[in-house]
Amino acid sequence: MKEFEVAQLSCFVKMLGCALDGRDHSRCCASSGVPMDECGSLCSGTVSSVDYRHFRCVEHLPTLANCALREKGVLPSAPKDFRFSNIGTDLGLLHWDPPSKLAGTVTNYVVHLRKVSPMAASERTWTTRDGRTDFVLEDLLPNSSYEAWRSRN
């Protein structure tokens, strides 16, 4: 890692320390897939300086920041009750309920779809508009299984 990147990481950790506000976010980090053996000190808010051990945590810093923001109550909760209906031979309606917290702040959702059988295919993504909580999946293949999920923007 270059000296400039180390300085950037150190600066980000200082900002993160301010966002953590002395709170321990280890539980959120662990449930979000952050490796606690390597990055646990960042999650617990006990890091005062950065060294080579933290370089492996760079890819997890956005998740840690989300944990801090979630606990401060400035991020919406997850959408609920994800379900399919009106399934036809080549289309289906995917819908969900908006988050219970801060639903009005969600401007759109990203819908992901991947065919899993009879033969896996690449993932397709679409973005909903205006916070809509439904989406029509088209061009599905008959006698096939799919997995779908959504994320919010």
Image (spheres, rainbow, N blue to C red):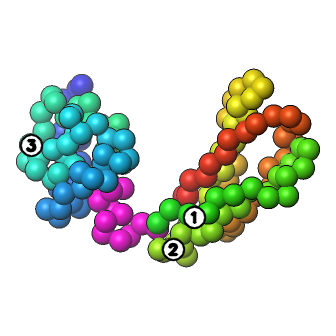
For marks 2 and 3 on the same chain, the one whose residue lies earlier in the sequence: 3
**Alpha carbons under labels 1 and 2: distance apart:** 8 Å
Residue located at (51% from left, 74% from top)? 100
Residue in the foreground of this view, choosing between 62 and 119: 119
Magenta-tinted stretch: 65-76
Mark 3 or 1, closer to the camera: 1
**Alpha carbons under labels 2 and 3: distance apart:** 37 Å
Residue 68 visible, this angle: yes
Assess disc 3: are there few (<14), some (14-19) or many (≥20) residues with their C-alpha within 10 Å of its C-alpha: few
> Horizontal and vertical percent for residue 105?
52, 72
Q: Does the residue at mark 1 contact the one at mark 2 (Cβ under 8 Å)? A: yes
Q: Amino acid at mark 1?
A: Lys
Q: Does the residue at mark 3 contact the one at mark 1 (Cβ under 8 Å)? A: no
Residue located at (8% from left, 48% from top)? 48
Q: Is residue 13 magenta?
A: no
Position of 143 compared to 49: left or right?
right
For marks 1 and 2 on the same chain, the one whose residue lies earlier in the sequence: 1
Residue located at (42% from left, 66% from top)? 75
Q: Which mark is residue 49?
A: 3
Q: Secondary structure at mark 3?
A: loop
Residue 121 visible, this angle: no
**Alpha carbons under labels 3 and 1: distance apart:** 39 Å
Q: Which mark is residue 80?
A: 1
Q: Amino acid at mark 2?
A: Ser
Q: Which mark is residue 134?
A: none
**Residue at image mark 2:** 100
User: Where, by quadrant of the figure, is residue 7 drawn?
Assistant: top left
Residue located at (30% from left, 48% from top)? 29
